[in-house]
Amino acid sequence: MSDLINTTANVQPFQFHVADDVLKAITNRVATYPWHEMPDDGGWDYGTNMEYLKELCAYWVNDFDWRAQEKRLNGFSQFIAPVDDINMHFIYEQGSGDAPMPLMISHGWPGSVAEFLDLIEPLAHPERFGGESSDSFTVVAPSLPGFGFSGRPPRPYGPRKMASVINTLMTKTLGFQGYMAQGGDWGGAVCSWLGFDHAPACKAIHINILTMRHPDGPQTPAEKAWEAQFDNDQIMQDGYRTQQATRPQTLSYAMMDSPVGIAAWIIEKFHDWSDVEVGEIEAAHTKDELLTNIMIYITTRTFNTASWIYYGRREEGGRILSPEGKRVEVPTGCAVFPAEMLNWPPRSYVERIYNVKHWTEMPRGGHFAAMEEPDLLLEDIRTFARTLR
């Protein structure tokens, strides 16, 4: 990585350190939160369960060690570089061996680069984990514009515009002639646009979510049944999405003022979207993992600008990839996790949107694949990449 700094003057090393007084203020706000009344039988039906949130907040105040998580994050090589007038943050891990494949991995909302902390080293250095260095990747994990440690865009960007920024990062800033892109949640949409707009620099994509739609809609009985089921499943999920796509600024005033509010807004998604039974969020995510991700939103003061991506996607035209029915023609790998909140359609539908060369139906796992099932995701990325090397 030193060569990159020497040849690219605008790429600067980055470390994140939260001031003691900021940590103290956050802890105080959590400790003094004015808990309100909630029906005893509410469970998780009305949103984040208060009993669990109180438990999490007690841990946050008394036991959570942000400094340990900060140290772990800062153990990775991180950088800031100006890209299309945005200061883009990214983790960079040079892969082992003679020819590591460049790989961009992208998070979504309400995630962050913290999703990938268990994935980066095995991707870059498989020989350290019983694998072969021939499977190695040089990993670039950016914080999306407006998220976490990256700067804010001048106005809401959708995933198509973010893909353009990331392609510039990969090609012009970092100098890669070609790369593969992987993503879930919004990262899946970003990867889709990278494959659609930025081939041949983006040589292939691997996604663990289907965010895009074909303009002609479902055609077969199985596809139509999927659409009906999808629409029904999304009824109880659409509230946050509609708010963030239409009036994110109004929401932000409350969220930017309340660490507990941000935690509740995000925890609901990690509970509902993970492959767990109701009330068993910690079967997939530890308190430390949950709070580390939440603290990134709070300490960087990016809850507002991170939510802008929904507004930006609406302005870009929504889920339709191409009104003309064109598809992503670069080789596409699909990791189909059974508890994905945006449930996958039949492969026949996906193949009208992507040049699907690899399709894996996973035995378990949900929306946050890199955190829930890092080993399954890792092996699937490797298997797909072997067909490209």
Image (cartoon, grey):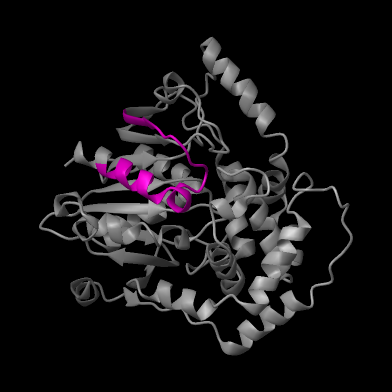
Residue 255 visible (yes or no): no
Q: Position of residue 207 (x, y in %)?
A: 40, 40
Please, is residue 90 above or below residue 158 in the view? below
Residue segment shown in magenta? 357-382
Task: Indicate whether residue 380 is drawn in magenta.
Answer: yes
Task: Indicate whether residue 204 is drawn in magenta.
Answer: no
Between residues 322 and 369, which one lies in front from this camera angle? Answer: 369
Residue at x 89%, y 60% (from the top left corner): 37
Please, is residue 245 above or below residue 326 in the view? below
Q: Position of residue 350 (x, y in %)?
A: 43, 26
Please, is residue 340 above or below residue 325 in the view? below
Residue at x 46%, y 37% (from the top left corner): 337
Residue 336 location, quadrant = top left
Left or right, 185 with reference to 388: right
Residue farthest to the top, as pictured: 221
Q: Position of residue 195 (x, y in %)?
A: 35, 39
Please, is residue 153 above or below residue 42 in the view? below
Left or right, 309 with reference to 174: right
Left or right, 16 with reference to 40: left
Q: Position of residue 137 (x, y in %)?
A: 23, 54
Residue farthest to the bottom, as pictured: 21
Quadrant that contains the N terminus: bottom left
Residue at x 58%, y 70% (from the top left corner): 295
Quadrant that contains the C terminus: top left
Count of numbered marks: 0
Residue 11 visible (yes or no): yes
Residue at x 25%, y 58% (from the top left corner): 124
